[in-house]
Image: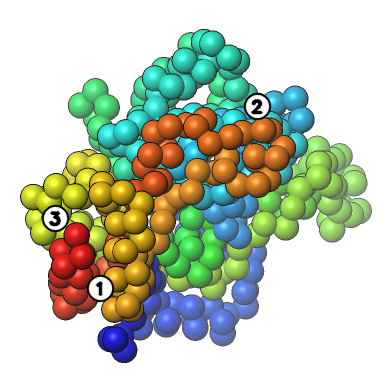
Amino acid sequence: MRKQTIPYAKQWVTEDDIHAVCKILSSDFLTTGPVIELFENKLCELTCAKHAIVCSNGTAALHLACMALGMNGNDLGVTSPNSFLASANCIEFCGGKTDFIDIDAASLCMSPDKLETYCREKTVPRVVIPVDFSGLAADLPRIKALSKKYGFAIIEDAAHAIGSTYTFEGKNFACGSCAHSDMAIFSFHPAKTITAGEGGAILTNDNELADKLRTLRTHGMIRNQNLNLSQENAGDEPWYYEMTTLGYNYRITDFQCALGLSQLTRLPQLKARRNQIVIQYNQAFKNNNHLILPPKGLTNEACPHLYPVQLTKGPKSRLAMYNALQERNIHCQIHYIPIYWQPYYANKYGYAKGKCPRAETYYSRTLSLPLYPAMTEAQVQMVIETVLENL
């Protein structure tokens, strides 16, 4: 038994990060201060999106995005079953109805073909939430073309994909650019490429949506200077505010944004190290018939978030591999149990196994190996050796 633990994911916090946070802790603002806007501006620079609205976490970002679209009990939203619960729960938070579109077997992201069949043969959803799984962009240009044809909105769930890009018609686009979506979201959870401890962001190029998002983030309040008040009222009541809609307290702190800003300066370094580890894994596992490697695009334009392999010898082989890794204190994960298998969705909508066969086949054999920039070469080799010994 090895004493050292290798988690499947881990933050990488430096002395510069610590200094950035400590500086805020001795400043005048701990929340709702100037660093929030600085972080938002840097996210706009990174993605080329016009607006960035940071908030308390990635789930809050998805919820705000659905709220900004006016989702309600009459609206249907669809997403990928191969994602974390939040990609679907955000629709439910708004009282909407949730359904799932099967994945493409090669990319592991939502299948545009299956989405078009759904729109043509079932119904057109109010919103589609494609997920950039493991850091690889979903087929956003194709989904955007379908949105023009059928009239649905798009929220890109880019929680896995800060720093990732994709190419369309010879041009390079950042995940989160909203070039092919109405909105996009990021997550800054410690398992993600950059962290703010917790935190999220919504990006958009739509001025009206951006205004709604900022209002919804802070209780639905609009303060005096942004209200259409007469000059006389503004002078008499400079403290005045109005709650124009029901919003939430989804704000983020300045010290979280300071950490995010500091980490953002190292994004190229973090991306390079993640890609280096992926290349090492690919080289080690490429000739093994019992493994299906992650999508090929994961080492090109993507900033890899996960390294999901598929074991093809059957369910027992995955469990045996999982246990063998655990015995050496190497902690892997499963990404993901199909969301509609969860009792909430199965009981509410009657969704049964067999609904999305590709996602279910993928789930039955997937295992995410450790991948994070602070991994040492010795740790990478230990993971490789343990996997190869147990195939």
Label 3 neighbour load within 10 Å: few <14, some 14-19, many 20+? some
Q: Which mark is residue 292?
A: none
Does label 1 or label 3 sit earlier along the sequence?
3
Quarter holding residue 195: bottom left
Q: Which residue is mark 2?
A: 76
Locate residue 124 relative to residue 93 in the image: left or right.
Answer: left
| Disc with the residue nearer the chain's start (3 vs 2) | 2
Picture coordinates of residue 194, whole percent (x, y): 39, 63
- For disc 1, the marked residue is 375
Q: Is residue 88 left or right of residue 224?
A: left
Task: Please give left or right for residue 291 compared with residue 56 in the image.
Answer: left
Task: Give 11 or 20, whichever is nearer the viewer.
Answer: 11
Q: How is the image coloured?
A: rainbow
Q: What residue is shown at x 19% (from left), y 74% (from top)? A: 382
Q: What residue is disc 3 on?
A: 285
**Residue at 48%, 78% in the rendered image:** 21
- Three-letter amino acid code of the residue under disc 3: Phe
Q: Nearer the viewer, residue 112 or 82?
A: 82
Task: Using the numbered discs, state the Cα–Cα distance from disc 2 to disc 1 in whole angstroms.
Answer: 42 Å
Query: Please, what secondary structure does the residue beneath circle 1 have?
Result: loop
Please identify the quadrant where the N terminus is shown. bottom left
The disc, 2 or 1, on the residue closer to the chain's N-terminal end is 2
Q: Residue at x 59, y 31 (%)?
A: 99
Q: Nearer the viewer, mark 3 or mark 2?
A: 3
Q: x%, y% of residue 109?
A: 38, 36
Q: Secondary structure at mark 3?
A: helix
| Point 20% across, 65% down: residue | 390
Q: Position of residue 184 (x, y in %)?
A: 49, 40
User: How many neighbours does mark 1 have within 10 angstroms: few (below 14), some (14-19), or many (20 or more)?
Assistant: some
* Relative height, residue 355 to residue 33 (above, below): above
Q: Kindly report the distance in space between the C-alpha atoms of the residues bearing marks 1 and 3.
A: 18 Å
